[in-house]
Amino acid sequence: MDLPNYFLADLPLEATLSPAMIAAACETLKRNREKYLAPRKLEDIVSLLCEVAAGWLEPHNKFRRLALEAASERRSPTRPVSIKQASRRRNHRQNQPPR
């Protein structure tokens, strides 16, 4: 699947961000918000986010697989961490008393 490279996060790691690039990205975000989000009800946006999050938890979700494959190509080789492991670690950190 070929996804478009529209965002600053899609730039190669060696790319240098310029003030003009960041300004253009901010303007694009503003236009996209007005075009795609502003007309929607908040409940519809939340519902869609919940559906996407639930789909992400499915091991065979095509977007999850794509993201994990792309991430593994961009980082140094380490032991793989499952979503459940990452979630457990996050919950453990959140449940620790403040230092």
Image (spheres, rainbow, N blue to C red):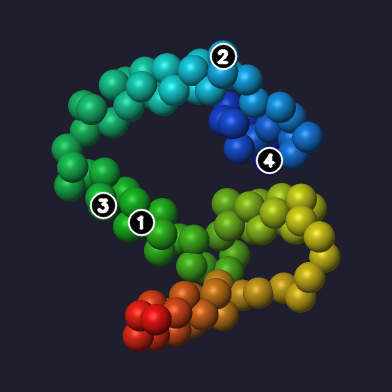
Q: Earlier in the sequence, mark 2 or mark 3?
A: 2
Q: How many marks?
A: 4
Circle 3 residue: 47
Residue lying at 34% horizontally and 51% vertically, measured from the top left: 49
Q: CA distance from mark 2 to mark 1?
A: 35 Å
Q: Residues within 10 Å of mark 2 (few under 14, many from 20)?
A: few
Q: Is residue 55 above or below residue 42?
A: below
Q: Secondary structure at mark 2?
A: helix
The front one of 10 and 59 is 10
Circle 1 residue: 51
Tag on residue 1? 4
Residue lying at 28% horizontally and 31% vertically, measured from the top left: 37
Circle 2 residue: 20
Q: CA distance from mark 4 to mark 3?
A: 25 Å
Residue lying at 18% horizontally and 42% vertically, measured from the top left: 42
- Report if the CB atoms under discs 3 and 1 are less than 8 Å apart: yes
Furthest toward the right, the residue is: 77
Amino acid on which the number 4 mark rests in the picture: Met
Q: Earlier in the sequence, mark 4 or mark 2?
A: 4
Q: CA distance from mark 3 to mark 1?
A: 6 Å
Q: Secondary structure at mark 1?
A: helix
Residue lying at 78% horizontally and 35% vertically, measured from the top left: 14
Amino acid on which the number 1 mark rests in the picture: Glu
